[in-house]
Amino acid sequence: MALLRQEVDPSEVGLDAKALDRLDQHVAHYVDEGRLPGFLVAVSRGGRVAHLTAHGRRDVAAGLPVEADTLYRIYSMTKPVTSVAALILIEEGRLRLDDPVADHLPAFADQRVYEGGSGAGVTTRPVEQPLLVKHLMTHTSGLTFAFYHCHPVDALYREAGLESAVLPGSDLARTVDAYARLPLQFEPGTQWNYSVSTNVLGRIIEVVSGQPLDEFIAERIFRPLGMPDAGFQVTDEQAGRLAELYGGTGDGGIEPILGLPLFGRPRFLSGSGGMVATAYDIHRFSELLRRRGELDGVRLLAPETVDLMTRNHLPGDADLRTFGSRPAHDEPGNDGVGFGLGVSVVIDPDRTQAPSGLGTYGWSGVATTTFWVDPAHDVTVQFLTQVRPRRSLKLYPDLKRLVHEALTD
């Protein structure tokens, strides 16, 4: 079985073991206070795991501990994987960043954009420029999420049955067609709005490759990289290792909630948030990016392609807060952070909420999972738990600060 293991003493790679212990103790308080069931945190430098801690329970009621092989729903951490899949097709010349989405998905022809009004009174006009593949990968597409509740187009998504981003009972193709029938919130490329864009990208991958999304990603990413547990479903063998999913309660505690329908192949293959993985799987994927497209003699992408993926694609000095189109993005955590092709990218460390090296990239999932790669310090971090909180735990800035404090050179 593939397990993530500590490979080197922290001091050998310029990390302070006492500072890393403080990190563990800080997060353990969340477990002690009943705000997290348990967690796994891993810190690597130069590709070698220098700190690995598993603490608490993967299933509180059953008393099952978090272990190195625990399986997690990584939700939106699926997006960087889907982006790598698209970049593989781009390198092969089967897809281009500047391709109009309608060239691959005809339902997006004659796209319209919101002009004014609300509800039945919404008015639209034709887009001035076509929606492109690069707009999907940078979340500048004009697509949205139903749960934002801050724009008339968000309400149109809810009226169309897209409250959870999937048309009930439908597959990826039918759901993406439902997105196409709705107006964009803004002209493509003019604002940043985190959205269902990566589901559309996943459908394009299916059309271009001629394979279902899960099969293409397994064949071209998971198997070549040696990510044995990553996928879009949980097998009988894996079932006992899957962490229970929890939601936040009104009093600040947690309680079990329903998660993704993972047992049996899902009808809806979400390139935005459908994956499960272990710490080992995530480490392998992070190492692919840190090593600029190659791992253990297997090259999936050219170095220049990974550089393109992990650099900022927002205009000028705009960050997610200033280029964001919705109040949901107007938060301190978006200061100094831009966006690449499927990952966030630190563009101004002086403005970030927590210490970060210039060019640090990564992404997070709604169940409080995250990873980041800091090229300036050659540090890679992942944090895994399974809680969808009612309110932000404000945990990520603390993690970044505590990891930064552990750097000794």
Image: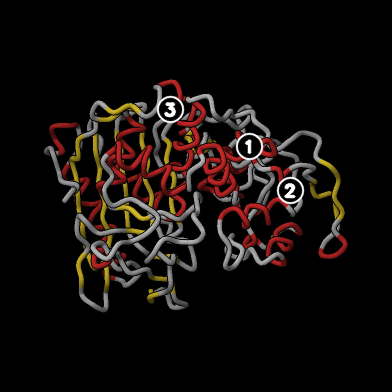
Spatial distance from mark 3 to mark 2, Cα to Cα? 29 Å
Q: Residues within 10 Å of mark 2 (few under 14, many from 20)?
A: many
- Please name whichever residue, 271 or 30, is drawn nearer the observer in this view of the structure: 271
In terms of image quadrants, where is residue 223?
top left
The amino acid at mark 2 is Leu
The C terminus lies in quadrant: top left
Q: Earlier in the sequence, mark 1 or mark 2?
A: 1
Q: Position of residue 311 (x, y in %)?
A: 49, 28
Q: Residue at x 48, y 38 (%)?
A: 83
Q: Is residue 249 above or below residue 27?
A: below
311 lies left or right of 114 = left
Q: Is residue 58 above or below residue 186?
A: below
Spatial distance from mark 1 to mark 3, Cα to Cα? 18 Å
**Helix, strand or loop at mark 3:** helix
Q: Is residue 322 visible?
A: no
Task: Give the labeled residue for mark 2.
Answer: 184
Q: Position of residue 319 (x, y in %)?
A: 58, 37
Q: Is residue 91 above or below residue 180?
A: above
Q: Position of residue 321 (x, y in %)?
A: 60, 43
- Which label belongs to residue 306? 3
